[in-house]
Amino acid sequence: MRRLQVIFAAILCLIMFCPNCGAKSKQIMNSRGYVGTLPDLTKGNEVKENSENKKPSVIAIPSKEFNSEKELKPTPIEDPTFVNIILKPDKTSQYINDLVEFIPILEEINDIIEEDGNVQIFNAKVYYFNKNAEYFRDKYNGKTESYFTTYKKLMDLNTHAKSIALLRNEATKYNPYFAYENEGYIYSKNNINEQLNYLKSEIEETILILRDAK
């Protein structure tokens, strides 16, 4: 009996001085299982999900202006590769372009001669040809082009065409005053037709030369 009293007193002391032990013993002995506070295991998952679903923020960096003079490189016009390949310059010189413009003018004069057109139309076409030839002469006179065959051919043809136009104009004025045909032979129809045929041959030859010029 004495021994049981000592054991009971020891247990009572443990309960008095260690209340937590009693609580734990109650938790363990509770028939309903563990009733203590468990750690929240969902917090870690929430943090993980938030870190996975969160999209990285985009930092807007202003782009440089496309038309900025500092950013655009100057065109390398001094580079022959760029000029010859990229720019692809027109291989036809200005002189050739000027020559080509005479072809339709000469063709019109040639057609008038073939059709035996009147003096006024013929002279008007020759006058237009003369003005273009004078501009052409002033543009290339004294330059390398002035030694070309095409240049000399145009100048000679212009001189001849003007002389025929003047002859036809004078014939219209003076023929009525010649009593005899021999007196005004230079203004006769036969002589004028002969001169026109010669001029026509010159025009056709010049047109061929101009078309072959390169």
Image (cartoon, grey):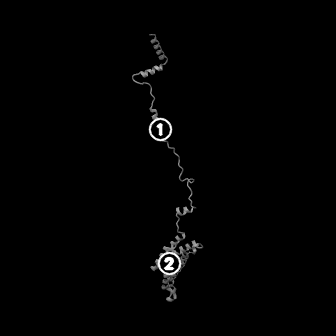
- Please count the marks in the image: 2
Q: CA distance from mark 1 to mark 2?
A: 91 Å
Whole-percent x, y for residue 111 in the image: 46, 77
**Which numbered tag is attached to residue 205?**
2
Residue at (47% x, 20% y) in the render: 21
Crowding near the residue tagged with mark 2, few <14, some 14–19, many ≥20 C-alpha atoms within 10 Å: few
Whole-percent x, y for residue 65 in the image: 54, 51
Amino acid type shown at disc 1: Ser
Residue at (48% x, 85% y) in the render: 190
Q: Find disc 1 in the rendering and name its residue.
A: 51
Mark in the foreground, 1 or 2: 1
Crowding near the residue tagged with mark 1, few <14, some 14–19, many ≥20 C-alpha atoms within 10 Å: few
Which residue is more in the foreground, 83 or 148?
83
The reply to whether residue 179 is in sight is: no
**Which numbered tag is attached to residue 75?**
none
Task: Note whether 48 is above or below 100 in the view shown.
Answer: above
Which image quadrant is residue 147 in?
Answer: bottom right
Name the N-terminal-most of marks 1 and 2.
Answer: 1
